[in-house]
Structure formats: C-alpha cells, structure tokens
Amino acid sequence: EVQLLESGGGLVQPGGSLRLSCAASGFTFSSYAMSWVRQAPGKGLEWVSAISASGNKYYPDSMKGRFTISRDNSKNTLYLQVNSLRVEDTAVYYCTRLSLIAVAAMDYWGQGTLVTVSS
Amino acid sequence: EIVLTQSPATLSLSPGERATLSCRASQSISTNLVWYQQKPGQAPRLLIYDASNRATGIPARFSGSGSGTDFTLTISSLEPEDFSVYYCQQRGTWPLTFGGGTKVEIK
C-alpha cells in the first residue's frame, strides 16, 4: 500500500524557516517524481514544487528563491525547505507522488502537515 | 502560465441528479488535464487523468471529456459521497496549475 506521511509542520514566526519531510513507503520511491502542493485555509490547491526521479527540480515563479525541494532516496524521504516564511505561507502542505502513466498527475497524496505562520 | 477556470463555483443538486462541471484552459493543453475530488478534512484524490481516463478504483459514474481548452467532468447520478469539491489540474506545461474548484453541494 502506498503511504505518504508528512511531518515538520507547526507554528512559526514570520521570517522563520521550516523543513517539511515526507516519508514514503509501499512503492519504489527512487523511480517516481514527487511534488508538494499547499492549500491555505478555505482556499484552493496551489502547486509548490516538484522533483523528478533523477533530481531535476521545478518551481512556479512565485516559489523560486524561498522554497527548496530535495529528496533522499536512501531514506525514501522527500523534503521541502521553506525560508523567510510569511503569513501568507500558512497552509496545509501535501506531499504527492507523480504518476508514471500520466506524468505530473498526482496519483497519491499524503494527509498533509499544517504550517501556521504567525507572531 | 496556463490559467484554468472552473465553473460554476458551486453546483447545487440532489442525489441521483447528473452533475456537469467545466474546466477551461487559457491555452491549448491537448488532453493533459486531470481531475481530483476533495472531501472536507481530507486530501484530494485522483479521479481522472488525461482528460478521460478513470484512475484505479474510480466508479464508472465519473467520466471526463474534452481536449484543447474545454473540459468537462460528468457525474452521471450523484451518490451521497460525491458531494465534495472538484479541482482540475493541467499537467502539460510547467508550472503545473490548478483550477479554483467547483463545490458540489446538496440541494
């Protein structure tokens, strides 16, 4: 069974940093591209970043500079480093697996980790 | 960046009725369109990929159609568990983008 378990969320002051983790199991992690998607309270979905199986990284322009995606295939873990946090970064951050059949379709999602940025 | 516009924002229907949700892209994305369902307090779930292919385990009452810029998700007969929010996403071009969502609520 595919499982994605996010951790690392919590309450952070504006300007702070956070590293989110996503522990993957039930599939060959190193063979799949992975992604982070966030959802602000009561809002829609926003793509944050993706990393290919070979390590190529992708970001929307709005996330470049403060967000860094990485992966450790030896630990079956995906990471998201977020720096200079802003109030508007408050959201549930989901880890997703990208499909092999339809590249960049998100076929599995974790339950999410809540990041709250507030003073 | 490709902008996806979903309509209507809210759809009020009764169980057993047919639901038709629209997703329009700002430029052609061929059939690189994905649909997700999100229930309150849960993560989204993949429903349809490549515009018309049901994901594993998705009931046949869900169907997708369209190509280019206009796409439709149809639920042939609404079951109680189908009242949720539905999002479309394009996977044809970086950056990946989502539509704003359509909420299907009980009338």
Image (cartoon, coloured by chain):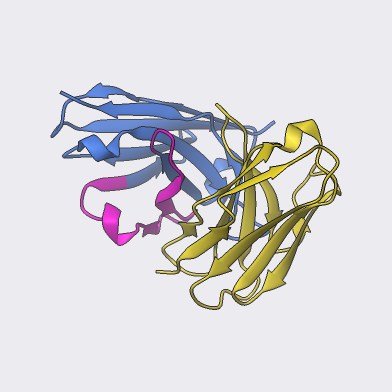
Chain colours: A blue, B yellow
| A48 in relation to A85, above or below | below
Location of the C terminus of chain B (image quadrant): top right
Identify the residue at the far front of this view: B107
Location of the N terminus of chain B (image quadrant): bottom left
Counting every numbered tag in the picture gives: 0
In the rendered image, which quarter is residue A109 located in? Answer: top right
Q: Residue A82: percent from the left, percent from the top?
A: 25, 39
Which residue is nearer to you in this view: A95 or B42?
B42
Which residue is nearer to you in this view: A68 or A109?
A109
Q: Residue at x 28, y 52 (%)?
A: A63
In the rendered image, which quarter is residue A39 located in? Answer: top left
Q: Is residue A89 left or right of residue B95?
A: left
Q: Is residue A38 left or right of residue B102?
A: left
Residue range (magenta): A40-68
For the question of whether residue B64 can be seen, the reply is: yes
Q: Residue B13: percent from the left, percent from the top?
A: 74, 42
Q: Residue A16: percent from the left, percent from the top?
A: 16, 31
Q: Is residue A28 magenta?
A: no
Q: Is residue B52 left or right of residue A7?
A: right
Q: Residue at x 79, y 44 (%)?
A: B58
Which residue is nearer to you in this view: A86 or A30?
A86
Q: Residue A93: percent from the left, percent from the top?
A: 41, 35
Q: Is residue A61 magenta?
A: yes
Q: Residue at x 49, y 52 (%)?
A: B100
For the question of whether residue B50 can be seen, the reply is: no
Q: Is residue B75 left or right of residue A36?
A: right
| B45 in relation to A92, above or below | below
Q: Residue at x 60, y 62 (%)?
A: B23
In the rendered image, which quarter is residue B21 located in? Answer: bottom right
